[in-house]
Amino acid sequence: MVNASQIKEHMDVKGSDGAHIGTVDRIEGDRIKLAKSDPASGGTHRYMDLTHVREVKDGCVVASMPAQECMSTLQ
């Protein structure tokens, strides 16, 4: 699992395929809270488990699965 301190507010969150998932609002416990203002959010806060993060690279959070699969795991 990636170190949560590497993840910063306003970072893009992408799937392993490079497709956009959302934008980091903040870290809450062992989850990333995604910004509800991001068009991909549908106007609500969604949460991504840190266990689904493969790496933080080039200022982006990269999921361990393609974006569409990752979106189905968001809470």
Image: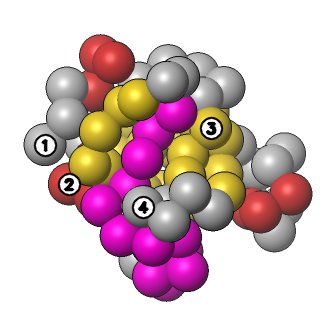
Residue at which label 1 appears: 1
Residue at which label 3 appears: 12
67 in magenta:
yes
Element type at marker 4? Answer: loop
Query: On the rendered structure, is 66 left or right of 11?
Result: left
Element type at marker 2? Answer: helix
Q: Characterize the local packing of mark 1: few (<14), some (14-19) or many (20 or more) Cα atoms within 10 angstroms.
A: few
Magenta-tinted stretch: 60-72
Q: Specify the amino acid type for callout 1.
A: Met
Q: Is residue 75 visible?
A: no
Q: Specify the amino acid type for callout 3.
A: Asp
Residue at which label 4 appears: 16
Is the C-beta separation of discs 1 and 2 under 8 Å? Answer: yes
Q: Specify the amino acid type for callout 2.
A: Thr
Q: Along the polypeptide, which appears first: circle 3 or circle 2?
A: 3
Query: On the rendered structure, is 29 left or right of 70?
Result: left
Q: Is residue 59 visible?
A: yes
Q: Is residue 8 above or below residue 27?
A: above
Instruction: Give the CA distance from mark 3 to mark 2.
Output: 17 Å
Query: On the rendered structure, is 24 left or right of 37?
Result: left
